[in-house]
Image (tube, helix red, strand yellow):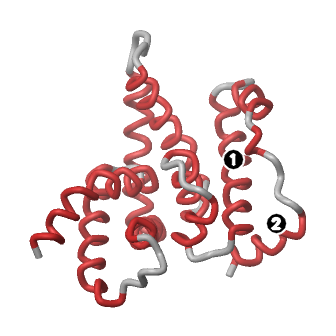
Amino acid sequence: MVAFETLVLRKTPSVVSVARRIIGNPEDARDVAQMAFLRVWEQLARYDETYSFNTWLYRIATNLAIDFLRSARSRERAHTATLHLVRMRESETGNETTRAAEDDSASRLFQRVSGRLTGKQKAAFVLREMEDLETHEIAAILSCGESTVRNHLFNARRILRKEVEKISPGLSRRTKSADPKAERPASAEAQSAKAEEEA
């Protein structure tokens, strides 16, 4: 029990961070993190050691965050949180000169424009671009093929570019040309991934 409490203390910040980026609301993210650790405790005997513990933990937390987004009540709360972040952004003045401020600004922009993404698109984007996980790790977390992950990422980037273009015309074109990851997936992979996404 002591070892599990230590684990919870050590892993809580990263689990809350992933959940917050997917959900957009810090309080709800903490609730999801608590549910994730409860689920881990309940299923500890069924843990498959062929996966890394982090992958298993992220899978549970990510799935709970996606489920949270899918519920109608939660969607409304996430939308309210996003609007709150937009209003905060619009009311801010002055230059953001520190790296922390830039990260915070990027995070708020993401929350503003990511409302059009599906839960899995958002989760894949967060895990790849914000948590810096590899495609095979994301596939394990989302319980899908790597081609599906690439399709989720491709669609997420496409949608985000469109939303950013609405807010700041020209910005997405500059980032697109500088982003080697923004390539279109192979058509066969895309069709297979799309079928998996719709399933």
Q: Is residue 158 left or right of residue 191?
A: left
Looking at this view, is 128 or 125 the one in front? Answer: 128
Q: Residues within 10 Å of mark 1 (few under 14, many from 20)?
A: many
Q: Which mark is residue 55?
A: none
Q: Quadrant of the C terminus?
A: bottom right
Looking at this view, is 143 or 27 the one in front? Answer: 143
Q: Quadrant of the N terminus?
A: bottom left
For disc 1, the marked residue is: 157
**Image quadrant assignment for residue 86:** top left
Residue at the (81%, 47%) spot, across then down: 183
Residue at the (48%, 49%) spot, across then down: 131
CB atoms of marks 1 and 2 within 8 Å:
no
**Amino acid beneath label 1:** Arg
For disc 2, the marked residue is: 190
Looking at this view, is 39 or 72 the one in front? Answer: 39
Q: Residue furthest bottom?
A: 46
Residue at the (55%, 71%) spot, across then down: 142
Q: Residue furthest left?
A: 2
Q: Residues within 10 Å of mark 2 (few under 14, many from 20)?
A: many
Measure how far apart labels 1 and 2 are at the Cα level. Answer: 14 Å
Q: Give how far across and how far down residue 100 sits, in percent.
A: 38, 26
Residue at the (16%, 63%) spot, across then down: 6
The mark nearer the N terminus, 1 or 2, is 1
**Image quadrant assignment for residue 65:** bottom left
